[in-house]
C-alpha cells in the first residue's frame, strides 16, 4: 500500500488525514457511482416508490453508521496487532498463545485464511466494477458512445497494471488531493438536490427502514444484496490503520468522508423522487449537463485510486502470507526507498490483471458485475465480527454478556447481508466463491505441505548436539572462512552440511546455522532481531526474528550481527542451501492430489537464497530428495 510517511518520521495530523482519505476510503468513496441505481434497476430490484426510496436511503445511512462507524471505526480499530491491522494481523493476534489448543487455533486461523482468500477475489472485482461504472458516464454524455465503454475501461486498466512495476510513489502523492476533490464534489452534487427536496432527510429516521422491511420483507431482503454495495471497501479502514494511525482515519471518516457520502446518497434519493426516470444513472444525472465531461474524468481518476489501493493491498497481503508460511516464496520488488510498503509482486500483479480484464470483457457493464460483487465483502465482514468477539474475550477480557451484547447485533447485520448476497451466486456471485476457494486451497496446501516436508526432513536428520559431539571426538579438516547453513530445523543437522562433509571431507573453521523465524507480530524491533548461541567446536546457532510485514535480508542481518560483536566478512562467508526434490508417495500426511499440487508450487517458488537476498556468488546449493 502506498504510504505517505517514512520510518521514524511523524507526519502532521492534516497530512495523515489527507493520505487516509486518498488510500483508505477510495473504494467506499466510489460506491455512490452504482449503489442507488442497483437498488432499483438491478437483478432483484425494488419497486420505485417514494416509500421504498426513503427506506433504501435509511438502510444505507444506518449501515454506514453501524457497520462502518461503530464496528470498524470505533471498535475494530482498537484491535491492533502492535499498531497494524488487516485480516492477517487480526488472525495472528487472536491465534497467539493457543499452541496448546490446536483445534481452536486451527479454526481461528482457518477463518483468517478464508478472509485473506476472499480479499483477492474482491481485489479482482473492485477495479473492474469501479472503472466500468465511471466510464459508463460516457453514455450519459452521448448514447452513441456506448460501444466505447468496454474498450476505454480496458485501456485504463492496462495502463494501471502496467505502471505497477515502476512504483506508485508519484501517483500516490496525488491520491489524497484527487480523492478529497472527489468527496467535495459528491457533497456539492448531493446538497444541490437536497435543497430542492429536503423531505428526503426523513430517511434519517430508522422507521423508514423498518417500514420498508415490514411492507415487503422478502423484497427488502433481496435488495440488501444491492444496498451492501454502499459499504464495500470497509475492510481498508482496518487494514490500513498501521499506515496512518487510528486518529487520522477516525477524523477523516467522521468529519469528511461520512458526511460527503450521506449527502450524495440523499441527493440521489431526492433526484429520484423528483424525476423517477433518473434512476437509470442517478449519480451522473445529479450533475448539470456542462459538468458531465469533467465529472466522468474525475470519477475515472477516483476509481483508479480505489483500484490502486486494492492492488497494493494484494501485494502487502501476499508478503504477509509468504512470511507466515501460507504462500510459496514469490519475487518481491521494492519500488521506493522512501515510502513504507511500496512493493511490487509481478506474479500477483499479472494474475489480477488477467482476471480483471476477463471480468470486464465477460460482464461488460457494472450492473452485470454487481451480481459478483458483495459476496467477498460480506463474508469478510462476518469473519471480522467473529474474530472481533474473540478479541473482546481473549485480548480485552470483556465479560461474556457484554461481548455478546456488542458482537451479536453486528454479526446479525453481517449475516443478513451475506445471506442476501448468497442469492446472487448464479448471477456472478460464483466468481468470488471459486477464486476464494482456489486460493484457500493453495494457502492451506502450502502450509500443510511445509509441515509434512519438515517432518520428513526431521525424521532423516541427525540431532545437532550428537553431531557436534562426534565432530569433537573425530574432528575433520577445517578450512578458513565461515559457512552459513540456512535451515528451517535449528535442532537438526542440515542435509546440505552432511552432503558437503561427505563429498568435500572438510568443514569451515566457523559454522553458523541460520534460521529465519516469523513471529505473529507485524514488525520485530532491531534489538530483538538476532539471537546467537554457541554450540561448541566453533558451531553457532543464529535465530533471526522477523514480523510478517518485515522483509528478511540476510546481508543486512549479518551486518547488524557485526554491530553486536558477532561479525561476518562477506567475502570469506559461504552460504549453503538445500534444494529439495519432492517425491509423492502413499505415506500418510496429505492426499495425493495435494502432494502433486504442493510439489508443483515448490518447483515454481523463488529460491530461498534469492528471496533472502543472499549474494548469488556466495551461494552453494546442494540437492536432496524427500519422499512426502
Image (tube, helix red, strand yellow):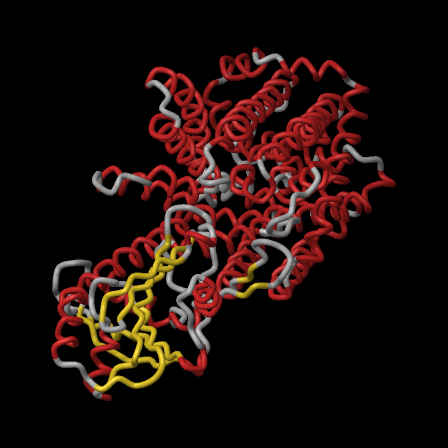
- Residue 206, horizontal then vertical, whole percent: 57, 13
Q: Residue at x 71, y 39 (%)?
A: 12
For residue 59, which quarter of the picture?
top right
For residue 26, which quarter of the picture?
top right
Task: In this rendered view, identify the residue nearer to me: 128 or 426.
Answer: 128
- Is residue 268 in view from this perspective? no
Q: Residue at x 70, y 16 (%)?
A: 201
- Along the horizontal axis of the image, is 326 left or right of 195? left
- Residue 468, horizontal then vertical, whole percent: 18, 71
- Residue 536, horizontal then vertical, whole percent: 23, 68
Q: Residue furthest front?
A: 565
- Residue 167, horizontal then vertical, whole percent: 63, 62
- Along the horizontal axis of the image, is 345 left or right of 602? right
Q: Residue furthest bottom?
A: 504
Task: In this rendered view, identify the residue nearer to me: 7 or 540.
Answer: 540
- Along the horizontal axis of the image, is 89 left or right of 186? left
For residue 22, which quarter of the picture?
top right
- Along the horizontal axis of the image, is 493 left or right of 292? left
- Is residue 546 in view from this perspective? yes
The image shows residue 234, relative to residue 297, as above or below, that is above
Task: In this rendered view, identify the residue nearer to me: 173 or 515.
Answer: 515
Quarter of the image that includes the C terminus: bottom left
Q: Residue at x 39, y 26 (%)?
A: 396
Q: Residue at x 46, y 30 (%)?
A: 417
Task: In this rendered view, identify the residue nearer to me: 156 or 365.
Answer: 156
Q: Residue furthest right?
A: 290
Amino acid at each position: 500500500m502506498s504510504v505517505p510517511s517514512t520510518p521514524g518520521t511523524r507526519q502532521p495530523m492534516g497530512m495523515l488525514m489527507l493520505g487516509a482519505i486518498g488510500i483508505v476510503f477510495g473504494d467506499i468513496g466510489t460506491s455512490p457511482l452504482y449503489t442507488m441505481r442497483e437498488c432499483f434497476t438491478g437483478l432483484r430490484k425494488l419497486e420505485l416508490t417514494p416509500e421504498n426510496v426513503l427506506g433504501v436511503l435509511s438502510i444505507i445511512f444506518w449501515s454506514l453508521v453501524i457497520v462502518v462507524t461503530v464496528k470498524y471505526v470505533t471498535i475494530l480499530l482498537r484491535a491492533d496487532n502492535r499498531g497494524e491491522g488487516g485480516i492477517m494481523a487480526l488472525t495472528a493476534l487472536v491465534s497467539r498463545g493457543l499452541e496448546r489448543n490446536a483445534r481452536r487455533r486451527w479454526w481461528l486461523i482457518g477463518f483468517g485464511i478464508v478472509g485473506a482468500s476472499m480479499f483477492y477475489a474482491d481485489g479482482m472485482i473492485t477495479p473492474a466494477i469501479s472503472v466500468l461504472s465511471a466510464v459508463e458516464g460516457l453514455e450519459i454524455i452521448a448514447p452513441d458512445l456506448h460501444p466505447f465503454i468496454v474498450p476505454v475501461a480496458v485501456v485504463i486498466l492496462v495502463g494501471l497494471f502496467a505502471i505497477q512495476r515502476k512504483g506508485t510513489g508519484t501517483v500516490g502523492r496525488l491520491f489524497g488531493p484527487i480523492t478529497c476533490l472527489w468527496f467535495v464534489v459528491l457533497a456539492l452534487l448531493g446538497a444541490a438536490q437536497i435543497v430542492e427536496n429536503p423531505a428526503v432527510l426523513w430517511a434519517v429516521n430508522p422507521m423508514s427502514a423498518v417500514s420498508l422491511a415490514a411492507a415487503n420483507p422478502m423484497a427488502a431482503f433481496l435488495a440488501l444484496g444491492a444496498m451492501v454495495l454502499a459499504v464495500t471497501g470497509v475492510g481498508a479502514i482496518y487494514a490500513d490503520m498501521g499506515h496512518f494511525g487510528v486518529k487520522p482515519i477516525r477524523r477523516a471518516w467522521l468529519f469528511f468522508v461520512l458526511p460527503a457520502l450521506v449527502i450524495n446518497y440523499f441527493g440521489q434519493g431526492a433526484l429520484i423522487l423528483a424525476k423517477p426516470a433518473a434512476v437509470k444513472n442517478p449519480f451522473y444525472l445529479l450533475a448539470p449537463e456542462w459538468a458531465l465531461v469533467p465529472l466522468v474524468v474525475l470519477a475515472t481518476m477516483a476509481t483508479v485510486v480505489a483500484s490502486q489501493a486494492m492492488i497494493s493491498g494484494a501485494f502487502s497481503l501476499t508478503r504477509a502470507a509468504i512470511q507466515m508460511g501460507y504462500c510459496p516464496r514469490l519475487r518481491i520488488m521494492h519500488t521506493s526507498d522512501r515510502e513504507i510498503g511500496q512493493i511490487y509482486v509481478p506474479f500477483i500483479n499479472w494474475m489480477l490483471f488477467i482476471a480483471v480484464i476477463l471480468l470486464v470483457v465477460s460482464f461488460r457493464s457494472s450492473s452485470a458485475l454487481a451480481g459478483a460483487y458483495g459476496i467477498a465483502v460480506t463474508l469478510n465482514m462476518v469473519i471480522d465480527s467473529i474474530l472481533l468477539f474473540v478479541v473482546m474475550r481473549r485480548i480485552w477480557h470483556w465479560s461474556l454478556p457484554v461481548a455478546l451484547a456488542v458482537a451479536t447485533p453486528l454479526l446479525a447485520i453481517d449475516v443478513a447481508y451475506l445471506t442476501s448476497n448468497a442469492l446472487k451466486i448464479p448471477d456472478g456471485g460464483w466468481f468470488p466463491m471459486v477464486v476464494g476457494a482456489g486460493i484457500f486451497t493453495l494457502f492451506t496446501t502450502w502450509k500443510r505441505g511445509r509441515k509434512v516436508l519438515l517432518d520428513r526432513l526431521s525424521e532423516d536428520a541427525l540431532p545437532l548436539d550428537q553431531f557436534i559431539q562426534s565432530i569433537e571426538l573425530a574432528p575433520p579438516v577445517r578450512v578458513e572462512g565461515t559457512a552459513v547453513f540456512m535451515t528451517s530445523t535449528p535442532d537438526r543437522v542440515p542435509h546440505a552440511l552432511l552432503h558437503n562433509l561427505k563429498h568435500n571431507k572438510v568443514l569451515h573453521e566457523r559454522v553458523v546455522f541460520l534460521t529465519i523465524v516469523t513471529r505473529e507480530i507485524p514488525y520485530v524491533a532491531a534489538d530483538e532481531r538476532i539471537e546467537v548461541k554457541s554450540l561448541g567446536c566453533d558451531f553457532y546457532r543464529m535465530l533471526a526474528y522477523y514480523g510478517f510485514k518485515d522483509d528478511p535480508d540476510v546481508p543486512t542481518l549479518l551486518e547488524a550481527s557485526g554491530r553486536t560483536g558477532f561479525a561476518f566478512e562477506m567475502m570469506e562467508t559461504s552460504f549453503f542451501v538445500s534444494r529439495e526434490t519432492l517425491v509423492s508417495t502413499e505415506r500418510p500426511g496429505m492426499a495425493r492430489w495435494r502432494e502433486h499440487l504442493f510439489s508443483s508450487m515448490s518447483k515454481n517458488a523463488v529460491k530461498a537464497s534469492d528471496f533472502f537476498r543472499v549474494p548469488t556468488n556466495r551461494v552453494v546449493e546442494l540437492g536432496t530428495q524427500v519422499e512426502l
